[in-house]
Structure formats: C-alpha cells, structure tokens
Image (spheres, helix red, strand yellow):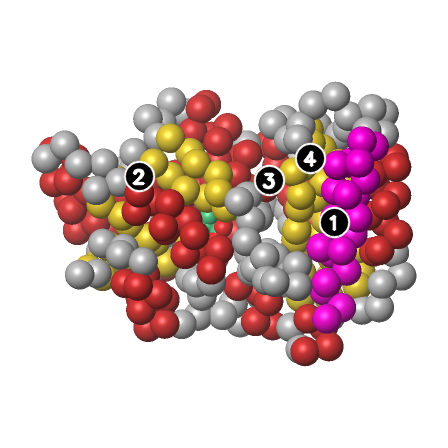
C-alpha cells in the first residue's frame, strides 16, 4: 500500500525505522507529472530497495524568475495512482513551506560542472537542484538514489556532490526513455501543441543522425556535430540553445578525435517550451 507522507520529520522517522531494521531504501526524486521515464526509475528502484520512496516536489529554487514554475504541470492524484501501479511504498510530497521555512538561505553549488550547457542558459538552476537533492537525501536517507540520464548534466552534478560531500549513497543513472517516434519523455512535453510536438522531433533526429555516424566509425567531433546540426539548424519552430559534445564524465568540451565516452547534448525552444535531449556515445 502506498503511504503519502507530507511532513519531513515523519518521512525521516519512517526512513530511520527501515534503516534500523536493516532495510535498504531506494529513492527517486521527481517534480511529479510522472511519465514512463519516471516509472522506469521506480521499477529499477523496486529491484534495489526494500523501501521504495518517490518524492513529488516542484522545487521553486531551481526555476529562474522568467521560467515556468507557476504553470509547471501537476497531477498529484494521477502521480499517486502511477506510483501505486509500480509498487512504490512511500510518496513524500512536502509543501514549499515545509522544505523552505522562513529564513532558509543555504545553497549547494557544484560550480565547475554547472558552468556550461543548461547551467549557462539557466543561471542558478543547478544550485537549486543540488540543494533540494541534498535536502531530500537527508530526509529520505536513501542507500540508492535513482536519476534519469535524460537530465545528464544534473546526474553528473549529483554524482559529484555525493562524492564530494561523502554521502553514503549509490547514485544510479537510468537510460532516457523515448516515445516510439523518438521524442524524449519529459513532463514539459505536455506544453507542446500537436504541431510543436512534430517539430520537436528534430532534436532526436539530429542526435540519431550523429549517433549513426558514430556507430559507423566516425570519431571526429566536428563531423558528429555537423551531422546533428544538419537536422537542427533551420528546423521549423526550433530555436537551438546549444548543441555540444562533452566528455561523458567531466562534461569538458570534446574537440578533435573522440577517444573516450562522450555525451552529445542539445537544448532548444520549441514554441515557448524548452526541451533537452542527449545521446551517449560510448
Ligand atoms: O529532475 C527533476 O525532476 C528535478 O530536477 C529533481 C531531481 C527532482 C530535483 O528537483
């Protein structure tokens, strides 16, 4: 049976009891409006822990002033039904006031990894993410933390934070999930009109074009980027924010020949909706 916990102290007590009894806790943090990508994380978490905890919290700290916090899609009842369907034990759904009471001011920064890509377009975003993930981990006390590779930069930032701050947590990155036509699943896809949804396919087409060249043996960074660019530049309705090839672990830019795993990452506006996608070349 799914338990809904809203109070951080009650969540912490629930987690402490499971730990005291020797149980492993698997944790999937989300901002809700769950889709198959989230459910794949929960299914993996189910295999890895005796207590499976999902958090649903639209974190104001990670939204800029001109971003979509107010209209971010929400459907708590639908989310709880989906969480139940994959055997989740606890949904932690705190209020903003419980997470950030008056006087709250601490921020966790991972400045190097957060400097480029989405961090450049969304200043302060990753400090908001790192802060809330650390806070949630202190409350939920997981042994295993599961995050999607869709938010690839976020995953690397959380991995770095966990290592740097000596958190005794295993971070598991799970593969990005796509619609049958290639669109990467995202809660923000709900914003897209039918026409924009079609236009958004340029992102995955571009990445696939580069991936195909890579699989065929191409290792020159410029050629791989050019293959993706060809699908993206001038694609109707798509305003490219970045298309970059980065080292998969350090997120340092990659130039010349690819001699290690890399991530090809893209962000674009489709209408008013900002979408990200990536492919890992390894
Ligand atoms: O990926 C997300 O949904 C959010 O950034 C996270 C990790 C739940 C933190 O708010």
Please provide the residue range marked out in magenta.
198-218
Indicate whether 207 appears above or below 251: below
Q: Which mark is residue 281?
A: 4
Indicate whether 220 appears above or below 53: above
Please name the residue that numbered disc 3 is placed on. Answer: 153
Q: Give the secondary structure at mark 1.
A: helix
Please name the residue that numbered disc 1 is placed on. Answer: 208
**Left or right, residue 3 beside residue 102:** left
Please name the residue that numbered disc 2 is placed on. Answer: 48
Mark 2 neighbour class, 10 Å CA radius: few under 14, some 14 to 19, many 20 or more = some
Ligand 1 neighbours mark 1 (CB distance < 8 Å) = no
Closer to the camera in the image, 25 or 40: 40
First of labels 3, 4 by sequence position: 3
Q: Which mark is residue 198?
A: none
Question: On the image, which quarter does residue 265 sit in?
Answer: top right
Res. 195 in view: yes
Q: Give the secondary structure at mark 3.
A: helix
Question: In 3D space, how far apart are the residues under numbered discs 2 and 3 (Cα atoms)?
Answer: 24 Å
First of labels 2, 3 by sequence position: 2
Mark 4 neighbour class, 10 Å CA radius: few under 14, some 14 to 19, many 20 or more = some
Location of residue 234 in the rendering, given as x and y in whole percent from the top left corner: 89, 61
First of labels 2, 1 by sequence position: 2
Closer to the camera in the image, 215 or 68: 215
């Amino acid at each position: 049976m799914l338990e809904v916990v809203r109070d951080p102290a009650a969540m912490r007590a629930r987690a402490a009891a499971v730990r005291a009894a020797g149980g492993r806790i698997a944790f999937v943090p989300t901002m809700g409006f769950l889709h198959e990508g989230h459910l794949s994380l929960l299914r993996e978490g189910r295999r890895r822990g005796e207590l499976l905890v999902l958090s649903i919290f639209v974190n104001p700290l990670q939204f800029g002033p001109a971003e979509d916090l107010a209209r971010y899609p929400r459907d708590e009842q639908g989310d709880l039904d989906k969480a139940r369907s994959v055997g989740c034990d606890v949904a932690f759904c705190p209020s903003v006031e419980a997470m950030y009471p008056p006087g709250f001011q601490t921020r966790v920064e991972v400045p190097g990894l957060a400097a480029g890509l989405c961090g450049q377009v969304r200043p302060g975003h990753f400090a908001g993410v790192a802060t809330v993930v650390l806070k949630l981990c202190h409350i939920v006390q997981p042994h295993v933390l599961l995050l999607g590779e869709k938010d690839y930069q976020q995953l690397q930032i959380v991995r770095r934070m966990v290592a740097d701050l000596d958190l005794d947590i295993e971070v598991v990155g799970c593969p990005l999930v796509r619609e049958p036509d290639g669109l990467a699943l995202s809660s923000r896809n709900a914003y897209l009109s039918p026409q924009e949804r079609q236009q958004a396919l340029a992102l995955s087409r571009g990445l696939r074009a580069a991936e195909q060249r890579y699989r065929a043996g191409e290792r020159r960074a410029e050629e791989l980027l050019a293959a993706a660019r060809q699908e993206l530049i001038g694609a109707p309705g798509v305003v490219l924010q970045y298309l970059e090839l980065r080292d998969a672990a350090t997120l340092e830019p990659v130039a010349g020949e690819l001699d290690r795993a890399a991530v090809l990452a893209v962000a674009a506006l489709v209408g008013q909706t900002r979408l990200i996608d990536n492919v890992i070349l390894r």
